[in-house]
Image: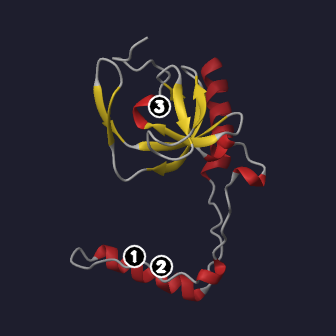
Amino acid sequence: MIILAFLLSFAIMVIPKCGCKKQPSVPAEEAAGDQELISAAADTNAIATLPKVDSSKLVTIPVSPTTGTSPAESFSRLFITIDGLNMRKEPGLKSEVIVKLPLYEEVYFLNEVTDSTTELSIGYQTVNEPWVKIRTKKGHEGWVYGAGVNYYKKKRPGTIE
């Protein structure tokens, strides 16, 4: 009796999900283009080409902290790995220091990295890294040495305490 009740409830749950789903209607021109792609994919010697897209139908959605989104939604999160890391106005050791950042502070990577790297001694190690542009939670923007930030909250080994 219990097995029969289970099978009946299973059938009631599965039958509506097995029904045919309506396909959205597609204009004839788009359907013809799709058919060309399908036939090209079926031919193993053919190179499939995508149909041209009308650029007037594309929509650009700006993602920026000025649109009301928080930096966490727009940029990757990094953590400071060297206590007292200098954030500078420009990439380079001769640039003005904006703020000193404490160990493990959360900052946001602004998707800018220098093309060249700089070799520095950070205590017991010599590293060769690029400069990275970041923003703090307080809104300071500037450049830090790449060895001083990481995606994981950890202390950089080889630094003098």
Name which residue lies at 46% across and 19% down: 154
Marks 2 and 3: which is nearer the front?
3
Q: Which residue is mark 3?
A: 149
The three-letter code of the residue at mark 1 reads Ile
Q: CA distance from mark 1 to mark 2?
A: 6 Å
65 vs 115, left or right, is right
User: Could you tell me residue 45's position as x and y percent?
Assistant: 21, 77
Separation of marks 1 and 3 at Cα, in angstroms: 47 Å
Residue 98 in view (yes/no): yes
Residue 112 screen position, x and y as percent: 49, 51
In terms of sequence position, does the residue under pointer 2 or pointer 3 come before the other?
Answer: 2
Is residue 1 visible to us here?
no
161 over 105 or under it: above or below = above
Residue on which disc 2 sits: 34
Q: Nearer the viewer, mark 1 or mark 3?
A: 3
User: Is 94 situated left or right of 1 in this image?
Assistant: left
Query: Counting other residues with Cα less than 10 Å from the Cα at mark 1, is it few (<14), some (14-19), or many (20 or more)?
Result: few
Q: Are marks 2 and 3 in contact (CB under 8 Å)?
A: no
Given residues 84 and 64, the one toward you in this image is: 84
Where does the N terminus fall, quadrant-wise?
Answer: top right
> What label does residue 7 carry, if any?
none
Picture residue at 58% right of the left edge, 43% below the top? 142
**Residue drawn 63% across the image and 75% down it:** 58
Residue type at mark 3 is Val
